Image (spheres, rainbow, N blue to C red):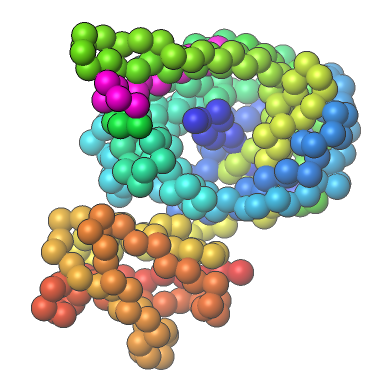
Amino acid sequence: MKKSLLAFLFAGTNIVNAQITFTQNDVAGVGKICLRANDTIHTKTAGGINPGTAGANQTWAFPTLAVGHVDTLTFTNPNWTPAMSSFPTANLAMKNSTDTSIAYISNTASGLFILGIYADVAGNGTFQPVKENLAEEVNSFPDTYNSAFSNTSKLSFTVPYTKQAGVDSIKVKQTVVKNIKTDGWGNLTTPLGTFSTLRSSGKVITFDTILAHVIINNSWVGIATTLDTVKHFSWVANNIGYSLLEFDSTKADTIKNITWLKATPTINSVNELSLNHNVFVYPNPAISTVNFEIKNADASSITLFNIAGERIAVIPINKSNHVTYNVDVLAEGIYFYNLLNTEGIPIDRGKIAVVR
């Protein structure tokens, strides 16, 4: 379930002891690749991380942040993605390599908003668009010291359910209420370096309701509700593209959902579009796995070649037209692929990059 689908973002490594202003232009654009580390070590002990104090000209130091796992976040054009028709006002999409979900975003002069996601919300291998009934605001622009915003976002989705007799589907409703203030500015230090930043913090209340559809009387029955309240912290800088650090603090002083920028975002030099738009490839560049999503084509396999033209793999396409290939065995570099139809004839081609 989405908590913060997105965070944000970006800056250089120069240390400047002055307040910054964060705007629409500081959000990662199409073609940027971010490596986001998830710290699962410091979430285990109350007081494992101290958010520090608010105010002007602060110093926040988190040099011991750990790496539990790394997400590759690829920012791309929504028109190049499978659910583009469901989010016509999106001008940015963010693909997550870990769960292959896509967040659809509206980046405007007044703020950054999440419009919804395309994800396997049921956990059964079927992806579907989930729209925000009310968009979730992530940042208001221009963002400066003592700026603030309030936002209420809502989403709902329905999935088939066959594990209980008399029930044919489950509906999930979520409401998120935010009251966020930019409460400090100063220098932030993480394992990536030291940056001139703005810090925001505030209460985030998430209310989830799960209902079951009862066949016999064609009605929805509530089966579970949850309420989660945290204080969310986030640090952003100019010209980087993603939040340098963010986490949630609970009443018990336990910090959770710790994510931090592991590497300065880079430009993706590989064209994510295939020649004839029959293959959607992501993440590209790839670190450990690459996904091929085939559409509008009767295809049987994908052949992969190295830069010398040697065939190194034949990847069969399953009935879902979505395959994941492990690139851990490949050296860093550029590779080419052909999409073959059922007669073994190439009908599309493209390239991917493998990075370490």
Q: Relative to 277, is 310 on the left or the right?
A: right
Query: Between residues 24 and 351, which one lies in front from this camera angle?
Result: 351
- Magenta: main secondary structure equals strand
Q: In which quarter of the image is residue 233?
A: top right
Q: Is 165 contained in the magenta span?
A: yes
Q: Is 303 contained in the magenta span?
A: no
Q: Where is residue 263 in the image (x, y as percent from the top left)?
A: 67, 55
Residue at point 49% right, 30% down? Answer: 1
Q: In which quarter of the image is residue 53?
A: top right
Q: In this view, does 341 lie above or below 320?
A: below
Location of the C terminus by quadrant is bottom right
Residue at point 63% right, 23% down? Answer: 143
Q: Give the range drawn in magenta.
A: 164-178
Q: Is residue 337 above or below residue 309?
A: above
Q: Where is residue 29 in the image (x, y as percent from the top left)?
A: 47, 45
Can residue 158 be seen in this snapshot?
Answer: no
Q: Position of residue 103 (x, y in %)?
A: 43, 37
Q: Quadrant of residue 345?
A: bottom left
Q: Is residue 112 above or below residue 287?
A: above
Q: Position of residue 52 (x, y in %)?
A: 87, 26
Residue at point 58% right, 43% down? Answer: 241
Q: Residue furthest left?
A: 343
